Image (cartoon, rainbow, N blue to C red):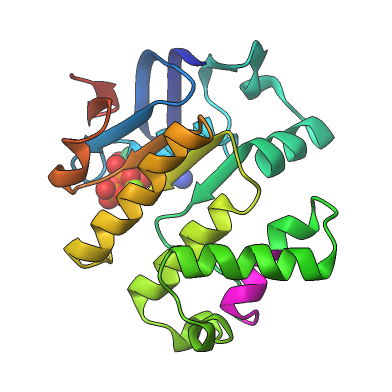
C-alpha cells in the first residue's frame, strides 16, 4: 500500500514560484497498475520523483508499508531507492560507457550477487524486452532510442522491485513493441504483486490500467 497525503512541491526560481504538485492525496494498493496522464508541465515527472524519493516535497507525506519515505535519509534512503524502487527515467539515464548488459547488471551489483548470476539475469531481462545478444554488447550510443528505452526498462526490473515508477516507458516504441512492454509490466503485477505507476501519453495503455489519474496544474482532476 502506498498512501500519498497532502503532497505539495513548490519550485522557486528568482521571484517566481511554481507549484508543480499542489496538495495531492491518493492511495494505491500493492499489485495494482496505475497510469498518470496530463499535459506537458502538469507535474507528472515531479510526482514520480517524489514517489521514488529522488526529491523531497515542500509538504505532505508518502507512506509506503507504514514508513514515511519523505523522512528517509542516508542509508535508509539508499536502501529504499535501491531495493524497493525500479525507476524508468523519461530520458533513460543510461551510463554511456557501459554496454546495455553492464547497465542492467549494475543495480544487481549493489545487491551483492555474483558476476555470473548478474550477467545471466541481465541477459534474460534484455531478452524479455526484445534485445538480441549483439545489441546487449553495445553501448547506449550505438542503440536506437527505443532500444535504449528497453534497456532502461530491463534495468528497472533487475532488482525485482516492489514498486516500478516509469516515466513514458513506451514513448519511443512502435505500438507493437509498446504493447509487448505493457504486457511484461502487467504480468509483473500478477506474478510478483509489483505495484506499477506509469506516466503515459498513450491512451491505449492508460485505458487498460486499474486506475488512471489525470494531472492538471499539479492537481488530480480525475
Ligand atoms: N527543478 C525545477 N525548477 C523549477 N521548476 C521546475 C523544476 N522541475 C519542474 N519544474 C516545473 O514544474 C512543472 C511540472 O514539471 P514536470 O517536469 O513535473 O512536468 P511533466 O508533467 O513531467 O511534463 P512533460 O510531459 O513535459 O514531461 C513545470 O511547470 C516545470 O517547469
Ligand atoms: Mg515529464
Q: Which residues are magenta?
A: 97-105
Left or right relative to 7: residue 52: right
- The single residue placed furthest to the front in the displayed view is 191
Q: As rendered, which of 189 and 84 lies closer to the eye?
A: 189
Q: Quadrant of residue 52?
A: top right
State ligand 1's quadrant.
top left
The answer to whether residue 175 is above or below residue 62 is: below
Determine whether, in the image, residue 188 is placed left or right of residue 221: right
Q: Where is residue 42? Give x, y as percent.
A: 25, 36
Q: Is residue 156 left or right of residue 209?
A: right
Q: Is residue 9 magenta?
A: no
Q: Position of residue 35 (x, y in %)?
A: 29, 34
* Quarter of the rendering occupied by the C terminus: top left
- Camera-nearest residue between 8 and 150: 150
Q: How many marks?
A: 0
Residue 14 in view here: no
Residue 63, compared with residue 96, is above or below; it is above
Question: What residue lies at 60% left-to-right and 71% top-to-bottom?
Answer: 123
Q: Which residue is rendered at x = 53% and y = 25% of the image?
A: 57
Please name whichever residue, 96 or 134, is drawn nearer the observer in this view of the structure.
134
Asked if residue 155 can be seen in this view, the reply is yes
The percent coordinates of residue 43 (x first, y second) are 32, 36
In this rendering, position of residue 202 left or right of residue 209? left
Q: Is residue 99 magenta?
A: yes
Above-or-below relation of 179 to 131? above
Give x and y (percent) for residue 121.
65, 62
Q: What is the chief secondary structure element of the magenta stretch? A: helix
For image coordinates 20% across by 36% down, the residue present is 208
Amino acid at each position: 500500500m502506498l498512501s500519498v497525503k497532502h503532497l505539495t512541491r513548490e519550485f522557486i526560481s528568482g521571484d517566481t514560484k511554481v507549484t508543480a504538485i499542489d496538495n495531492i492525496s491518493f492511495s494505491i494498493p500493492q499489485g495494482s497498475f496505475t497510469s498518470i496522464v496530463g499535459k506537458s508541465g502538469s507535474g507528472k515527472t515531479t510526482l514520480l520523483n517524489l514517489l521514488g524519493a529522488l526529491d523531497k516535497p515542500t509538504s505532505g507525506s508518502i507512506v509506503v508499508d507504514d514508513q514515511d519515505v519523505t523522512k528517509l535519509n542516508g542509508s535508509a534512503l539508499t536502501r529504499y531507492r535501491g531495493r524497493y524502487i525500479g525507476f524508468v527515467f523519461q530520458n533513460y539515464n543510461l551510463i554511456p560507457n557501459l554496454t546495455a548488459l553492464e547497465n542492467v547488471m549494475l543495480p544487481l551489483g549493489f545487491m551483492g550477487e555474483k558476476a555470473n548470476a548478474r550477467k545471466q539475469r541481465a541477459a534474460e531481462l534484455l531478452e524479455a524486452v526484445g534485445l538480441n545478444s549483439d545489441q546487449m554488447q553495445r553501448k547506449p550510443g550505438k542503440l536506437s532510442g527505443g532500444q535504449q528505452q528497453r534497456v532502461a526498462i530491463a534495468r528497472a526490473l533487475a532488482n525485482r522491485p516492489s514498486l516500478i515508477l516509469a516515466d513514458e516507458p513506451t514513448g519511443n516504441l512502435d505500438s507493437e513493441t509498446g504493447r509487448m512492454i505493457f504486457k511484461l509490466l502487467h504480468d509483473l503485477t500478477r506474478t510478483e504483486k509489483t505495484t506499477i505507476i506509469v506516466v503515459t501519453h498513450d491512451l491505449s495503455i492508460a485505458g487498460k490500467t486499474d486506475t488512471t489519474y489525470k494531472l492538471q496544474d499539479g492537481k488530480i482532476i480525475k
